[in-house]
Image (cartoon, rainbow, N blue to C red):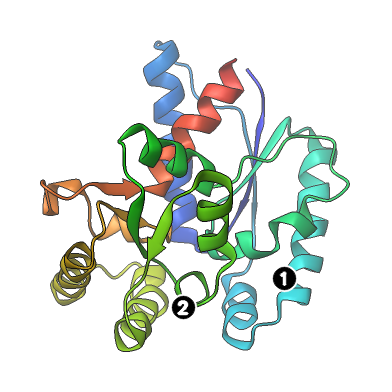
Amino acid sequence: MKRIGLLGGSSDQATADYYRRLNKAVNDRLGGWNTAELLVSSMNFALAERWVRTADWDAAAEYLTGRARALEAAGADLLICTSNTLHRVADRFTAGLTIPFLHVADPTAEAILKAGFNRVGLLGTKPVMATDFMKRRYLERFGIAVVVPGEPDQVEVDRIIFDELCRGQFLPAAKSRYLAIADALEKDGAQGIILGCTEIPLLIGQADRPHLPMLDTVALHVEAVVERALA
């Protein structure tokens, strides 16, 4: 079994969910008392919050580069990042590593193509929705068009992520708002919805909209990385 390195802590809620899901996925595959071989580097979330709020991506890249190299030196055989948003600087913090990095968008894109979709909605933090780094990856590498909510809804989705989900608060009002936004994206032609922030699957999921595919980036990422770790 290969040892998986996690760049975590953004947020602790998502990182704990990754930890639980990775161990369960390995046990589902191997049975018995088997769990995943993991190395977790969990940052102070206040750092990530400041980088995102101030768009200080240079500081994010510098910090994550140090953490990624530390995980490699500690014995990680492959690397993942538990935050969609921090993938904005993935090319920078993985530069020079000798271990593979599994990008969070790629397993999701493969699932979208397998389903026969070419236009999907995207929910995430403001940088994920309002800028093009994630949308461009889906389009240029996989030919998938991504639609996002309008500005007022983007602001509210982002606020709920930082002020509620990252603090472990999963409130009915937030769930209703997210589902209403997903419904609007479906009306705009989205064939499915990318849950493009790793806290969002803790709030909404497929059971909430059985007819509308909910593309859980955490579940798909975990499935792909466990496949790689056990190959």
Residue assigned mark 2: 126
Name the one closer to the observer, 19 or 140. Answer: 140
Spatial CA distance of label 2 from label 1 is: 16 Å
User: What residue lies at 25% left-to-right and 60% top-to-bottom?
Assistant: 203
| Quarter occupied by residue 13 | bottom left
User: What residue lies at 34% left-to-right and 47% top-to-bottom?
Assistant: 216
Between circles 2 and 1, the one closer to the viewer is 2
Q: Secondary structure at mark 2?
A: helix
For the N terminus, give its image quadrant: top right
Q: Residues within 10 Å of mark 1 (few under 14, many from 20)?
A: many
Q: x, y (%) of residue 49?
A: 56, 78
| Quarter occupied by residue 101 | top right
* Image height of 18 relative to 171, above or below: above
Q: Are marks 2 and 1 in contact (CB under 8 Å)?
A: no
Q: x, y (%) of residue 217?
A: 41, 48
Residue type, numbered disc 1: Ala
Residue type, numbered disc 2: Lys
User: What residue lies at 55% left-to-right and 69% top-to-bottom?
Assistant: 132
Q: Is residue 185 left or right of residue 227?
A: left
Single out the residue that lies furthest toward the right.
96
Q: x, y (%) of residue 158?
A: 39, 78
Q: x, y (%) of residue 134?
A: 54, 61
* Image height of 119 relative to 113, above or below: below
Q: Which mark is residue 110?
A: none
Residue assigned mark 1: 60
